[in-house]
Amino acid sequence: MLRDATPDDVAMLQYWDTQPHVIESGAADASRDWAQEIGRGSWHDILIAECGGRPIGVLEILDPARDEDRYWGDVEPGVRAIDIWIGEAGDLGNGHGTQMMQLAFERCFADVGVHTILIDPLVSNTRARRFYQRLGFREVGPRRFGHDDCVVYRLGREEWSLRGQRPPP
Ligand SMILES: CC(C)(COP(=O)(O)OP(=O)(O)OC[C@H]1O[C@@H](n2cnc3c(N)ncnc32)[C@H](O)[C@@H]1OP(=O)(O)O)[C@@H](O)C(=O)NCCC(=O)NCCS
């Protein structure tokens, strides 16, 4: 299940930011002030995924058109951008990420105004790129965000619907 992050999660999020697999993925930013970011605005959801009551990972869902930081630049309404990471290395590769993304898709597309989901893994993060492609994302192309060389992928509402909203094979 997914729940909103609260100030009680700050220490855990900071700890996860120190994990080598999170740092390597570019998902972590040591300078990030979680206490300030949690509850910052309705355009930015920070969600904790729990399995059997145990927190296992984070999902961030951003509305780029309303993002105060303008990370994605000019973006039309109806788009959401997702970031995801599993906190502990021991929880990687157990299907949690796939389940989290399915929940994120349902959540995003529950808003009838949302037509597209974007993600931007580092070019070097080949495992995450494979993960996203298996979920139905299609490559848009390379893009540099700050100092990061990324690849943008998109998933449209119609592709998601055609997949029957089921986990991929
Ligand atoms: C990407 C991620 C969220 C997927 O969640 P997961 O629970 O590990 O994934 P699942 O078990 O549902 O699916 C397995 C797939 O996840 C991906 N994956 C597994 N470990 C990974 C790792 N250390 N880094 C990146 N992707 C990984 C692979 O595509 C894997 O498939 P493979 O075994 O055929 O290579 C998770 O691996 C993770 O947090 N990785 C590190 C952070 C990251 O890369 N986040 C994405 C930033 S854009």
Image (spheres, grey):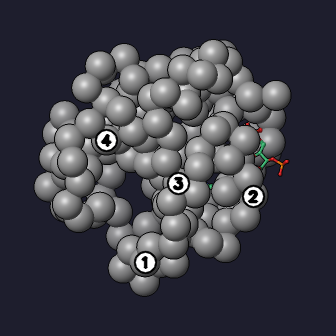
At label 1, the amino acid type is Arg
Dot 1 or dot 2, earlier in sequence: 2
At label 3, the amino acid type is Tyr
Q: Nearer the viewer, mark 1 or mark 2?
A: 1
Q: Are marks 4 and 1 in contact (CB under 8 Å)?
A: no
Label 2 CB less than 8 angstroms from ligand 1: yes
Find disc 4 in the rendering and name its residue: 79
- What separation in Å lies between label 4 and label 1 (alpha carbons)? 19 Å
Q: Residue furthest bottom?
A: 147
Find disc 2 in the rendering and name its residue: 127
Q: Are marks 1 and 3 in contact (CB under 8 Å)?
A: no
At label 2, the amino acid type is Arg
Residue 7 in the image, given as x and y percentages of width and height? 31, 37
Asked whether 25 or 135 is in front, the reply is 135
Dot 3 or dot 2, earlier in sequence: 2
* SS assignment at label 2: helix
- What separation in Å lies between label 1 and label 2 (alpha carbons)? 19 Å
Point out the image quarter for the C terminus.
top right
- What separation in Å lies between label 1 and label 3 (alpha carbons)? 13 Å
Residue 110 in the image, given as x and y percentages of width and height? 36, 17
Find disc 3 in the rendering and name its residue: 153
Residue 144 vs 36, above or below: the answer is below
Q: Nearer the viewer, mark 1 or mark 3?
A: 3
Dot 1 or dot 3, earlier in sequence: 1
Q: Residue 92's quadrant in the figure?
A: top right
Residue 90 vs 112, above or below: the answer is below
